[in-house]
Every structure is written in structure tokens, then in C-alpha cells.
Amino acid sequence: MYEIGFRAHDLGKFNDVETFNEALLKNNCPKNIQLAPTKLFSNIDQISYQDEKWALKTSEDLKKYNIKVSILGCYVNPLLIDIDKRNLMINNFKRSIEISKLFNNTIVGTETGTDKNARELNITEEKRINQFWNFLETILTVAIKNNSQIAIEPVAGHTINNFETIDKMLDRFNCDNLKLIYDPVNFIPTKNNIKNEDYLKKETQIKLFDTFFKKYHKKICAIHMKDFLMINNVKKGDLSLFEGRLFVNEFIKEMTKYKVKSPLLLENVNIKEINNIVANLNKI
């Protein structure tokens, strides 16, 4: 049986861990979470502004209520060209890496900047990927120093968006401190592809699942689970699991085939149905 958790801020914003725990219990939510402090706690603006005392107190409170942090989320945009904002973003990530060990967890996750950002800033593909390499090199240095791990989530339309770009990244940064978050919905193309409707087919999805797991099963540290539809050939990828067209049974079978034991973390989850969703996953 796999560990099942969810993205904590899907439950809302809270003043402290105690009130968050009350909401967990009230809604029968699993106590395994992806924690993004700036999104979960109403009094946290920038994680880099928080001192060791805050991190220690928060981690102690989470342990008190038996809440496990599988991923510390610090989702940033590495394509920022504003120097001040970029430095703040990097400092936030560095700080997240430094405090991750206090949460009995050494993994900090992020996406890699969107295609839209690149077009708006008139960034060429080469400059875009080089800018991401520079960012990754900077944060990996901190991760290695702190014996922590960086988890990159490949997303269609982002800098790391397909098998080719994942391979380039892993070849360039060949170290144990670099891991992957696999979100099967985010990895499906978003739009502008006449074959998008093919991704509704079982055989197309299975091929994608199988290829990802076969290539990267040793690098995957977490799985994001949500659902999607194709509307007028455009992906709507923000549905709660079992509300769309993702072949969940086949996904879990492929995951099991390659002996991936990473936690399944629900995203965009329908909180009212979370108990049933967890029960259905456990049945698989």
C-alpha cells in the first residue's frame, strides 16, 4: 500500500499548525502533506524572512500532531529577469533547503518557469534553458552542503517539459541530490497540438506512464495526483482525482511494475470527497 497525502493549502490558509490540524481532523484528511508555508500560513510572506525559531516551532507542532511533510514546496519562477525579485526567489529556495531537515524531510520541490514567461520576456530557448541551469546549479550547491534534495516537476509548456529536457537536465547535473516529482496530468501537453485528444485514450496514457517510469523510476521522489479533461482540444488539468479522464488504475499498475514507492500526493483535491478518494486509491 502506498502512502497517500495531499497538498496542504488545498484545505485553505491558517494562522498556525493547531488550527490546520483541526481542519485536517474535521475533513478526514490524511496527515501526509506537501507543505508550502507561504501558501498554508496566513502570516508567512517570504520563507527567507523566517528565522530558525519559527522553523523549529512549526516543525515541533507538526510532529506533535503527527503530520508528516513529504515535500517542502517552494515553487518559483527561474525565468525572472528582475534582479531583486530573482535574488529574493533564490533566497527563499535556499532557506527552504536549509530548514527542510527540521521537518524530518530533505526534499524541496519546484517547477521550472513557463513558456508564457519566456515569450513575454522575449527569452530565446537557449537563454531560457541556460538561465534555468544557472538557477539549478546555485540551489544544488546549497542542497549538497545541507545533504538535502531538489525535486523538479516537469510540466508541459515549462522549461523542463518533456523527456528530452529531463534527460538534458539529468545528464548535466548527475548527482543524488536531484530528484523528480511526477505529475502525469501536468506532463500531458496543454494545447496547440492537433493530437491532444489522443491523450484521452488508454493506450496513449499507458505508453506515457510506462516511458516515464521506465526512464526515471530511480529518480522519482513524489507523485502528484489530480485529473483532467480535454475541452475543444485544450487540457483542463485542475480537476480532483477521479473526476476526469486520467486512467488511475493503469497509472498505479505501471508505478507498481517499476517498484516506485514514492508517496501519492493529491492536488486540486475536492476536500469533501477526500476520504472517498483515499479509499478508492487504497482499493487499487
Image (cartoon, rainbow, N blue to C red):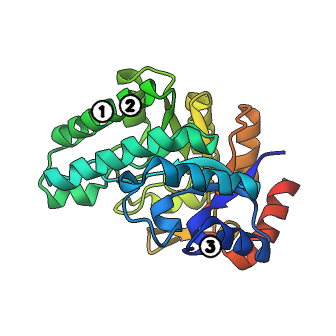
Image quadrant occupied by the N terminus: top right
- Give the distance between the C-alpha atoms of the residues marked 3 and 1, in whole angstroms: 33 Å
Q: Quadrant of residue 25?
A: bottom right
Residue at (71, 31) in percent of width and height: 258
Q: Position of residue 22 (x, y in %)?
A: 73, 73
Mark 1 or mark 3, which is nearer the start of the sequence?
A: 3
Q: CA distance from mark 3 to mark 2?
A: 31 Å
**What's under tag 2, amino acid-wise?**
Val
Q: Residue at x 35, y 35 (%)?
A: 139
Residue at horizontal 46%, vertical 21%?
175
Please, what is the three-letter code of the amino acid marked with disc 3? Leu
Does 275 sit left or right of 212 as displayed?
right
Q: Nearer the viewer, residue 247 or 94?
A: 94
Q: Is residue 213 left or right of residue 128?
A: right
The circle on residue 142 is: 2
Left or right relative to 20: residue 169: left
CB atoms of marks 3 and 1 within 8 Å: no
Three-letter code for the amino acid on which mark 1 is drawn? Thr
Q: Position of residue 12 (x, y in %)?
A: 57, 75
Mark 3 and mark 2 residues within 8 Å of each other at the beta carbon: no
User: In 3D space, how far apart are the residues under numbered discs 2 and 1 (Cα atoms)?
Assistant: 7 Å
Q: Secondary structure at mark 3?
A: helix
Q: Secondary structure at mark 1?
A: helix
Q: Which mark is residue 11?
A: 3
User: Label 1 belongs to which residue?
Assistant: 138
Quick check: can you spot residue 93?
Answer: yes
Q: Position of residue 280 (x, y in %)?
A: 83, 62
